Image (cartoon, helix red, strand yellow):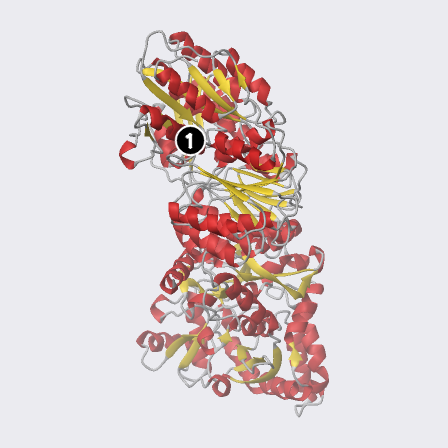
């Protein structure tokens, strides 16, 4: 019965939640019934859920937040050093996740910071950096998210690192991410040996400038469109970026070849990027952040705009609650381990890369990437079920990111804090696992969820703000 | 030597109706003396303690499995029966689909479309599900009771702004385009539109109209509090708008429990501005009863008033005396109507839904003098199924009241229709016969239903009459007979 229909006309279809006998009674009268598999909400959330649900701002606020997000076109417009782009000065370091101090920092974050300090020339030997960070007088730590940036795993950014620049042409807003270092012993997993520093120097001296030149010459690369193509090609753009990496290379290859660098250096760059299936992840992440940032700060909106981990805490930010972080203990991932590593070697979840799930890809689009389901500890039916289940906790869908195997349904988009608390379904995140000891590097990859407690905490703050407005 | 087994299952959930069936199935297992599987709500914990079980601490989100067994050896079979019954209950709600069923009303509406939502989750969660419907621009019917009044006001304000109808909360009955929702009688299509701030009041009107051969275009329930000062008749006005815009509707009747006077006046003024004529059947002291109002409505329609049906032998006063009228109701409005009528003759009547606060019954529900109990009231349904589905509490009380020498007459209602018990007389008739075997107390029953109802009006009324009850279709007529019997008069 919609506003235009008449009470003497039977309903065409009914949604029923609660006691099954009422649904059965309607079905017995030949009216189609869709039954809801209802369970009580997370404990202690009933009152806050009702307050937020009755907030007159909520429906339009969420529609606005999602539409702003979907309107963003993320264009790769440049590659330049963090010092230029972010005004990052010597001794200033960015890291993944919500704010954290050295004392509480996990092994991989410490290892990455130590490596970065050596890379910046603050210390000779990375091991010497521990005292520097423990004292905290000449160095400072700040989340990437607070500077419009995102960082995979430890997410450590220092002034000399080169970064991708993503821009929304309609608004001129920008986001940033460092260049992907490849797999194995790498800084983002907390490794800081000589080969790690050598690679960082090559990226600073050769790869960064070469990419900067090529992207400028090739013109903006449409990252949002590449993400859509990737989902058609077996990538979920978090743990698999093979198609995306190749598409990026295809777009900038002519300009790379025409650059001022020697053919030997260009060949090295091709080999490095082509041999690194995660290269595009560092474009996908800021593209997702650019879109999600557009959804920030809409009063009354219950949409999650960031999920991020620093290796100790898992934090979320919500559109209707500004820059406030809601944090809980980061969880251990469930998945597969490299070599001899096992669960005891893994650090709790780390990295800003859950920005992909926040935007509706990664674990949310697992159904698009059957090739890697086993790598992250699942089966193809699990992947389909996960992508469908995520639709229960999202506000809308992204029609620019259709998933073929789900009959081209758009990626589930806009995690709703209320829906998470109502259903108890937690966002599913694909992730890599860092060794918990500084310097070890990657030990595996798998699946993880946020700590459940942070959603009721965010809901309570949304409810408090709703009551204050009333 | 009997053995008790009590376990808490944290986070397990099934609705109260499903658990009622589970409890029954398990209780029927050989070796099981008593079984109660229920969510650990305050009321259910009291019921379990009343059954003699000792319970560990539990939250209302936990399921309690409480078993009393003839001996230890029966435990494994009993637990297997619990799991089988719970699995059967779950099967009903998921339908064996390949894709997991939707988890929220919003998700269900996105997946399947739909132009109406039915909400019967516990009251604390009802608004959230109902808002999903309003967000999808769909009307909603809320069966749930125990919804805070400020939540009702909030959602009704939003609905009114969006031109949507909220039926309820605590809305037991609606008929939309011939489809009965909740506790609804099967009626023929016709030209009368009903707006009801009262479920069983609505059913009484539908039953009497049906007996008079008059059909119904739609009956829109608005919830028992809609005409209170706090809500101000918001859904009543939307329902009137809907019926007024429907060319099938030629006459509207508004049925309500005693409304707030200023709200009734405002709604009457609003109705006067509509094209379709509206008659108000609002219960209250000095106001006509529902049967009288239906007779007036038949007059509006130019239809002759029939003789309202009765079944059974006229009841005789109890041979051993007693002076008190005891009403045991499942219908709140029927209870209200009976109290209003009886108070005129008998004076103050104590009740769990009293006409004045100083007449409130204590929680034992057993006090000297005239009393009437509404077993469908929120206080007696928290975490339990409505007595129109689960007659346990009322049947227990019937035996107690009948044995009380102070009781002169017992007045009861039986309400038929979709959603109600499959065969209420099957439980009630033997209970009446058993009570009258102990003490020959007269029992007068208002049996509200239509001949097309799934339970069959005539079959139910005849079974109750055969057990010794005097049965009426009209609650007002039944109440007048009970008053006469309480004051020593015979027919």
- For residue B395, say whether it is visible: no
Residue B271 left/right relative to B482:
right
Which residue shows up at 50% across the image and 47% down it?
A: B236
Which residue shows up at 59% across the image and 87% down it?
A: A209
Q: Looking at the picture, how far across and down is residue B238, in whole percent?
A: 53, 51
Which residue shows up at 63% across the image and 63% down it?
A: A236
Q: Out of A304 and B114, give the one closest to the viewer.
A: B114
- Find residue A463 and report its image quarter: bottom left
Residue A350 left/right relative to A226:
left
Q: In this view, does A38 lie above or below B71?
A: below
Q: Which chain carries label 1?
A: B
Q: Out of B409 and A382, give the one closest to the viewer.
A: B409
Q: Give the class, few, some or many, for how many residues have Cα within 10 Å of label 1's Cα (few <14, many ≥20).
A: many
Q: Looking at the picture, how far across and down is residue B161, in whole percent?
A: 51, 59
- Find residue B476 and report its image quarter: top left
Where does label 1 land, which residue? B337
- For residue A229, say whether it is visible: yes
Q: Looking at the picture, how far across and down is residue B207, in whole percent?
A: 56, 29
Q: Please, which residue is most extreme toward the bottom here?
A: A260
Q: Looking at the picture, how far across and down is residue B196, in whole percent?
A: 50, 40
Q: Is residue A81 above or below residue B266?
A: below
- Find residue B41 and report its image quarter: top left
Residue B195 left/right relative to B438:
right
Q: For the N terminus of chain B, which image quadrant?
A: top left
């Amino acid at each position: 019965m919609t506003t235009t229909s008449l009470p003497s006309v039977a309903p065409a279809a009914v949604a029923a939640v609660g006691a099954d006998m009422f649904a059965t009674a309607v079905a017995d009268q030949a009216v189609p019934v869709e039954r809801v598999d209802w369970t009580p909400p997370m404990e202690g959330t009933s009152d806050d859920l009702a307050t937020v649900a009755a907030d007159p701002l909520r429906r339009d606020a969420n529609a606005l937040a999602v539409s702003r997000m979907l309107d963003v076109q993320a264009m790769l417009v440049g590659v330049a050093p963090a010092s230029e782009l972010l005004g990052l000065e010597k001794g200033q370091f960015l890291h993944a996740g919500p704010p954290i101090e050295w004392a509480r920092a996990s092994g991989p974050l410490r290892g990455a910071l130590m490596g970065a300090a050596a890379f910046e020339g603050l210390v000779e030997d990375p091991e010497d950096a521990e005292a520097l960070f423990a004292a905290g007088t000449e160095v400072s730590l700040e989340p990437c998210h607070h500077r419009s940036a995102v960082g995979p795993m430890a997410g450590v950014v220092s002034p000399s690192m080169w970064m991708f620049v993503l821009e929304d042409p309609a608004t001129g807003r920008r986001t940033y991410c460092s260049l992907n270092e490849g797999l194995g012993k790498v800084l983002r997993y907390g490794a800081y040996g000589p080969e790690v520093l050598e690679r960082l120097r090559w990226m600073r001296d050769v790869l960064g400038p070469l990419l900067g030149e090529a992207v400028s010459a090739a013109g903006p690369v449409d990252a949002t469109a590449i993400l859509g193509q990737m989902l058609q090609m077996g990538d979920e753009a978090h743990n698999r970026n093979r198609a995306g990496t190749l598409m990026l290379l295809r777009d900038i290859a002519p300009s790379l070849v025409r650059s001022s660098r020697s053919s030997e250096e260009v060949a090295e760059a091709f080999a490095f990027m082509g041999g690194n299936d995660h290269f595009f992840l560092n474009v996908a992440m800021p593209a997702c952040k650019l879109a999600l940032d557009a959804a920030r700060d809409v009063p009354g909106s219950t949409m999650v705009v960031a999920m991020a981990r620093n290796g100790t805490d898992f934090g979320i930010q919500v559109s209707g609650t500004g820059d406030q972080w809601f944090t809980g203990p980061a969880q251990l991932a469930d998945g597969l381990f490299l070599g001899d590593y096992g669960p005891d070697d893994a650090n709790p979840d780390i990295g800003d890369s859950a920005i992909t799930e926040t935007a509706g890809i990664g674990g949310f689009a697992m159904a698009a990437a059957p090739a890697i389901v086993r790598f992250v500890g699942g089966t193809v039916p699990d992947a389909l079920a996960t992508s469908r289940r995520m639709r229960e906790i999202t506000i809308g869908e992204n029609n620019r990111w259709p998933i073929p195997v789900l009959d081209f349904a758009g990626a589930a988009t806009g995690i709703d804090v209320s829906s998470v608390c109502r259903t108890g379904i937690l966002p599913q995140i694909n992730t890599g696992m860092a060794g918990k000891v500084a310097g070890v590097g990657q030990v595996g990859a798998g699946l993880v969820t946020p700590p459940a407690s942070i959603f009721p905490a965010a809901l309570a703050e949304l409810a408090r703000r709703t009551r204050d407005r009333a | 030597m009997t053995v008790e087994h009590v376990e808490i299952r944290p986070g397990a959930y099934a609705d109260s109706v499903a658990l009622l069936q589970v409890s029954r199935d398990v209780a029927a297992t050989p070796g099981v003396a008593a079984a109660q599987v229920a969510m650990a709500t305050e009321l259910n914990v009291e019921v379990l303690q009343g059954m003699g079980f000792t319970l560990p601490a539990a939250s209302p989100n936990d399921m309690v499995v409480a078993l009393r067994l003839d001996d230890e050896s029966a435990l494994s079979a009993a637990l297997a029966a619990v799991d089988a019954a719970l699995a059967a209950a779950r099967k009903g709600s998921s339908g064996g689909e390949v894709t997991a069923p939707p988890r929220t009303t919003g998700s269900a509406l996105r997946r399947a479309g739909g132009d109406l939502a039915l909400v019967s989750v516990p009251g604390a969660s009802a608004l959230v599900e109902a808002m999903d419907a309003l967000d999808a621009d769909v009307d909603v019917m809320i069966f749930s009771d125990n919804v805070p009044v400020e939540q009702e006001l909030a959602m009704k304000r939003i609905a009114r702004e969006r031109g949507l109808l909220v039926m309820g909360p605590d809305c037991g009955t609606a008929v939309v385009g011939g489809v009965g929702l909740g506790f609804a009688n099967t009626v023929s299509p016709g030209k009368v539109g009903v707006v009801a701030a009262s479920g069983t009041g609505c059913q009484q009107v539908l039953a009497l109209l049906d007996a008079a051969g008059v059909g119904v275009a739609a009956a829109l329930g608005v919830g028992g509090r809609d005409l209170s000062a706090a809500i101000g008749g918001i859904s009543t006005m939307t329902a009137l708008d809907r019926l007024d815009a429907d060319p099938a509707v030629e006459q509207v009747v508004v049925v309500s429990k005693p409304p707030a006077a200023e709200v009734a006046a405002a709604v009457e003024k609003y109705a006067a501005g509509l094209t379709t004529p509206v008659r108000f059947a609002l219960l209250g002291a000095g106001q006509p009863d529902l049967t009288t109002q239906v007779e007036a409505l038949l007059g509006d329609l130019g239809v002759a008033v029939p003789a309202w049906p009765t079944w059974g032998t006229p009841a005789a006063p109890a041979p051993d005396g007693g002076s008190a009228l005891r009403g045991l109701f499942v219908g709140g409005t029927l209870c209200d109507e009976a109290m209003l009528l009886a108070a005129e003759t008998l004076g103050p009547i104590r009740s769990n839904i009293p006409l004045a606060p100083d007449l409130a019954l204590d929680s034992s529900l057993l006090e000297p003098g005239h009393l009437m109990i509404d077993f469908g009231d929120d206080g007696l349904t928290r975490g339990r199924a409505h007595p129109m589905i689960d007659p346990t509490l009322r049947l227990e009380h019937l035996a107690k009241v009948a044995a009380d020498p102070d009781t002169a007459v017992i007045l009861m209602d039986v309400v038929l229709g979709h959603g109600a018990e499959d065969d209420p007389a099957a439980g009630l008739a033997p209970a009446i016969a058993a009570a009258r075997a102990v003490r020959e107390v007269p029992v007068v029953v208002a049996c509200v239903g239509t001949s097309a109802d799934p339970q069959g009006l005539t079959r139910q009324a005849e079974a109750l009459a055969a057990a010794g009850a005097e049965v009426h279709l009209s609650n007002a007529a039944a109440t007048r007979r009970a008053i006469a019997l309480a004051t020593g008069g015979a027919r």
